[in-house]
Amino acid sequence: MRLWLDTEFNGFGGPLISLALCADDGREFYQVVRCERPVPWVAENVIPVLRKSSLPGGELELAEKLREFLNQFDECRIVADWPDDVALFCRALIVGPGQRIQSPPLFFELAYDLPSTADISKVPHNALEDARALRKFGKDRP
């Protein structure tokens, strides 16, 4: 199954704020974790459009919900338009030293030929809307 990935994070190289996956078949995953001290740009452009409360358990609860979502599939081809999205997704799989969530086989693709989500998303900087936009505009890719 191809899953379109988008994340939001707190400034360049900063921690994850939200993660979304949109499957070609319409199934979706969207979670938000706490952002204690957002940088000014994030406070102005990301926090107001999250449209979801942060998870009380933070990153561990995110990992558990992500495990549940991913294990619906036999294998996943994760498609993202930005390297940090893949890095933050992979970080979300790790739950402790030497520990990660169980998932089906995962394959990653960085798609550099998609339009910017800032231009195509219904709500730019909302990870779910951005992932939906990537799916819509990338659906005809092989």
Image: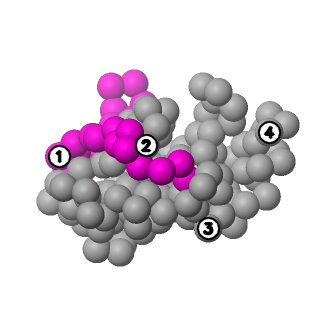
Q: Residue at x 77, y 49 (%)?
A: 45
Where residue 76 appears, as percent x and y from the top left, is 23, 53
Q: CA distance from mark 3 to mark 1?
A: 31 Å
Upstream in the sequence, badge 3 or badge 1? 1
Where residue 111 appears, as percent x and y from the top left, is 35, 42
Q: Residue at x 22, y 45 (%)?
A: 106
Q: Residue type at mark 4?
A: Trp
Coloring scheme used: one colour
- Quickly name the residue at label 1: 105
Foreground mark, 3 or 1?
A: 3
Question: Magenta span covers which residues?
Answer: 91-117
Q: Is residue 95 left or right of residue 45?
A: left
Q: Residue type at mark 1?
A: Pro
Kindly check if marks 1 and 2 are in contact, taking CB atoms under 8 A apart as contact.
Answer: no
Q: CA distance from mark 3 to mark 4?
A: 19 Å
Q: Is residue 14 left or right of residue 134?
A: right
Q: Residue at x 62, y 52 (%)?
A: 118
- Quickly name the residue at label 4: 41
- Quickly name the residue at label 2: 81
Kindly check if marks 4 and 1 are in contact, taking CB atoms under 8 A apart as contact.
Answer: no
Foreground mark, 1 or 2?
A: 2
Q: CA distance from mark 4 to mark 2?
A: 20 Å
For disc 4, the neighbor class at 10 Å (few under 14, some 14 to 19, many from 20) is few
Is 57 rendered above or below residue 26? above
Upstream in the sequence, badge 1 or badge 2? 2
